[in-house]
Image (cartoon, rainbow, N blue to C red):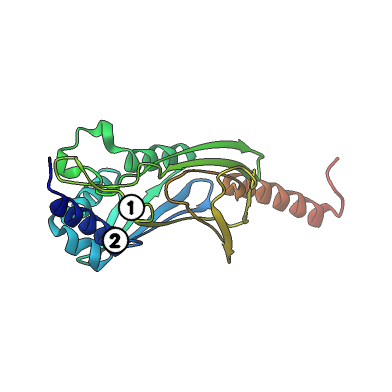
């Protein structure tokens, strides 16, 4: 059995570590829809000094794992600094978004080594329902982010620390026509705010965060077809001064 003095020192160390590591990982994720067939998943990750000082080798392994996953999904990464990483992953349509997003944030089935495991444990999954209305496409997205098991893992996968507010995580949605939150009163409810054409959620640590949003994106194929038909009608009218029967 551990001596009382040793136990007190261990508990004191754990308390100090928990206090020092609060909010030491800033993670911003943005899903940007340009139109029906193009968009980008943009992620910006910054590790605080306290986090990297706590275990610098683990932090390096984690950043390398994120870079590898982005590359496998045909994305690009930029090391802003030794503690800061910028990731951009393009997608071609809604199905491509769902596939790449879920593969990036849930890599368990990708035969990763122990060193490739996420240092901060979070699970996230997105689902997207789309309906084409010729000129525009209506999207309804559902996103679940599980922060109940938030913790810090060692290189061998064992739990090192599990502070409730280790991670400051914002998820944003950028659309050309704006977005509307669905079931705002559903519990738990992440903090929501608008910044220009962006809808941003600040997620709650220690909870299963559920997000639902509806938005429209233009269909350039439909708009182009409507424009061509309109020009044909206009040309006919200007030539014959009457609309075709």
Q: Is residue 187 left or right of residue 86?
A: right
How far is mark 2 from mark 1, CA to CA? 8 Å
Does the residue at mark 2 contact the one at mark 1 (Cβ under 8 Å)? Answer: yes
Residue at the spot 68% in from the left edge and 47% down from the top edge: 226
Q: How many marks?
A: 2
Crowding at mark 2 (Cα within 10 Å: few <14, some 14-19, many 20+): many
Crowding at mark 1 (Cα within 10 Å: few <14, some 14-19, many 20+): many
Viewer-nearest residue: 187 or 39: 187
Q: Is residue 109 left or right of residue 179?
A: left
Residue 227 % position (x, y): 67, 51
Residue 41 % position (x, y): 40, 52
Task: Report which quarter residue 15 is drawn in.
Answer: bottom left
Residue 138 % position (x, y): 62, 42
Question: In the displayed structure, would residue 100 be above or below residue 165?
Answer: above
Residue 70 % position (x, y): 28, 48
Residue 186 numbered tag:
none
Q: Is residue 176 left or right of residue 209?
A: right
Viewer-nearest residue: 117 or 218: 117
Q: Quadrant of the N terminus?
A: top left
Q: Secondary structure at mark 1?
A: loop
Q: Secondary structure at mark 2?
A: loop
Residue 21 numbered tag:
2
Question: In the displayed structure, would residue 146 be above or below residue 42?
Answer: above
Q: Earlier in the sequence, mark 2 or mark 1?
A: 2
Q: Quadrant of the C terminus?
A: top right
Q: Is residue 6 left or right of residue 43?
A: left
Residue at the spot 40% in from the left edge and 45% down from the top edge: 147
Residue at the spot 65% in from the left edge and 40% down from the top edge: 134
Viewer-nearest residue: 200 or 91: 200
Residue 163 numbered tag:
1
Residue at the spot 31% in from the left edge and 62% down from the top edge: 19
Q: Residue furthest front?
A: 4
């Amino acid at each position: 059995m551990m001596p009382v003095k040793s136990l007190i020192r261990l508990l004191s160390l754990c308390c100090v570590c928990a206090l020092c590591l609060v909010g030491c990982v800033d993670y911003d994720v943005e899903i940007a829809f340009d139109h029906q067939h193009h968009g980008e998943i943009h992620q910006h990750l910054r590790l605080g000094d306290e986090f990297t000082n706590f275990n610098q080798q683990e932090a390096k392994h984690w950043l390398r794992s994120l870079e590898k996953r982005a590359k496998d999904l045909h994305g690009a990464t930029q090391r802003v600094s030794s503690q800061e990483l910028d990731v951009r992953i393009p997608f071609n349509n809604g199905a491509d978004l769902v596939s790449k997003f879920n593969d990036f944030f849930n890599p368990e089935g990708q035969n990763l080594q122990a060193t490739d495991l996420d240092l901060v444990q979070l699970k996230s999954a997105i689902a997207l329902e789309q309906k084409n209305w010729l000129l525009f496409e209506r999207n309804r997205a559902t996103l679940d982010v599980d922060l109940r098991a938030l913790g810090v893992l060692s290189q061998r996968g064992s739990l090192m620390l599990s502070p409730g507010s280790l991670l400051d995580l914002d998820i944003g949605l950028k659309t050309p026509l704006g977005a509307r939150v669905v079931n705002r009163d559903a519990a738990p409810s992440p903090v929501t705010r608008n910044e220009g054409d962006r809808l941003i959620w600040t997620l709650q640590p220690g909870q299963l965060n559920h997000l639902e949003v509806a938005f429209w994106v233009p269909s350039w194929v439909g708009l182009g077809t409507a424009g061509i038909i309109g020009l044909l009608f206009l040309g006919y009218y200007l030539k014959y001064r009457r609309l075709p029967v």
